[in-house]
Amino acid sequence: MDKILVTGALGQIGSELVVRLREIYGADHVVATDLRSSAHEITRSGPFELLDVTNDKAMFEIAKRYQVDTVIHLAALLSATAEEKPLLAWNLNMGGLMNALEVSRELGCQFFTPSSIGAFGPSTPKDNTPQDTIQRPNTMYGVNKVSGELLCDYYFHKYGLDTRGLRFPGLISYMTPPGGGTTDYAVEIYYAAVTTGRYTSYIAKDSNMDMMYMPDALTAIIDLMEADSSKLTHRNSFNVTAMSVDPEAIAAAIREEIPTFILDYDVDPKRQAIADSWPHSIDATAAKMEWGFHARYDLKAMTKDMLCKLGERHV
Ligand code: NAD
């Protein structure tokens, strides 16, 4: 990676990834783009362009103008929102991906896009979910993610495009709020802990899902993109995870720091149905073996850091 274009850069992942990439590769080497603008520092600390990823010509023009050699495609509609707006999800998630792949093919770029644990479905083995297994998701987001994985593999095999991806679990972070996913509760619970001291979960007790802290997710993206291509047997996409937790487990970890924290439940059937279709815990062995994936934060370490960082903001 030398000159990198990031789409959807103002979202939960992009807003932190661009900062990390600019520290490593230089501010001028990372072109942040999004459909919207904001006062976020990434719009000022290096190149920033307005870009709707469904506009193929605009994407090509920006990528060519900045002579990028890497595309990191993040713009997407997330699981809960995609289920509410399935047509928009198809057009954005598949149309945007196709445009980003075509631009990368025409300009010979290395390519990354995230998949998700949403790419699995009800018939997938739920515990220790293998890297290669049944993928028959029953959500629009899941259909988009499986199709995206296949499309990225297709571009690798047909055109030799260096496509790579990660199946992210729910990502927990304190910088930018999550954008409409099923695991958003696992971020909201920390915000609530430092503000009101109680949280009402829309996800049921005992619903275990994989999660990872944002610093580990950013490292995973960069490590995968920098990995020796010849060592990769898989490409699109690698299972990665740091922990498998339910709301009770997170609440118990929060109570280690804030003993008075209260957790209630008011389950949202729509988001619960999505959660019920996903694995309980996925197996990240292929990522560990092929490019050395390693998560530094477990639930305890992540909780300590989240509460500390959010606490600093609310004093
Ligand atoms: P987000 O919703 O926080 O951010 C998405 C960004 O895309 C937003 O800034 C939005 O303005 C932008 N966007 C929307 N429509 C656009 C368009 N037409 N053109 C350009 N930009 C547009 O999402 P995120 O959490 O940062 O996720 C990024 C990627 O990672 C997605 O592919 C998502 O499916 C995947 N992922 C995220 C998680 C997670 O927990 N955050 C987990 C698994 C996979």
Image (tube, rainbow, N blue to C red):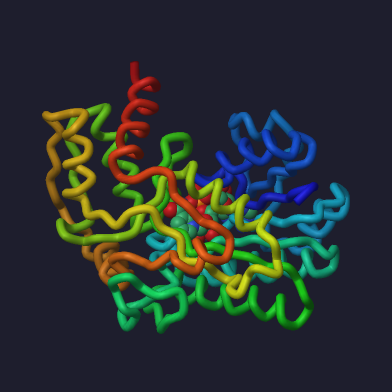
Q: Is residue 144 above or below residue 41?
A: below
Residue shown at 64%/67% (left/top)?
A: 97
Percent position (x, y) of residue 41?
A: 62, 29
Percent position (x, y) of residue 205?
A: 15, 56
Q: Residue furthest top?
A: 315
Asked where in the image residue 234 lies, by quadrant, the reply is bottom right
Percent position (x, y) of residue 100?
A: 71, 64
Residues 214 and 176: in front is 214
Residues 305 and 298: in front is 298
Q: Relative to residue 66, is residue 145 drawn left or right?
A: left
Q: Relative to residue 201, is residue 44 drawn left or right?
A: right
Residue shown at 39%/27% (left/top)?
A: 309
Residues 227 and 144: in front is 227
Residue shown at 68%/50% (left/top)?
A: 6
Residue shown at 28%/40% (left/top)?
A: 300
Residue 157 appears in the rendering: yes
Residue 88 appears in the rendering: no
Q: Is residue 194 above or below residue 297?
A: above
Q: How many marks do you count on the picture? A: 0
Q: Relative to residue 264, is residue 82 drawn left or right?
A: right
Percent position (x, y) of residue 196?
A: 21, 29
Q: Relative to residue 91, is residue 310 drawn left or right?
A: left
Quadrant of the snapshot with the C terminus: top left
Q: Is residue 155 above or below residue 259?
A: below
Asked where in the image residue 198 lies, by quadrant, the reply is top left
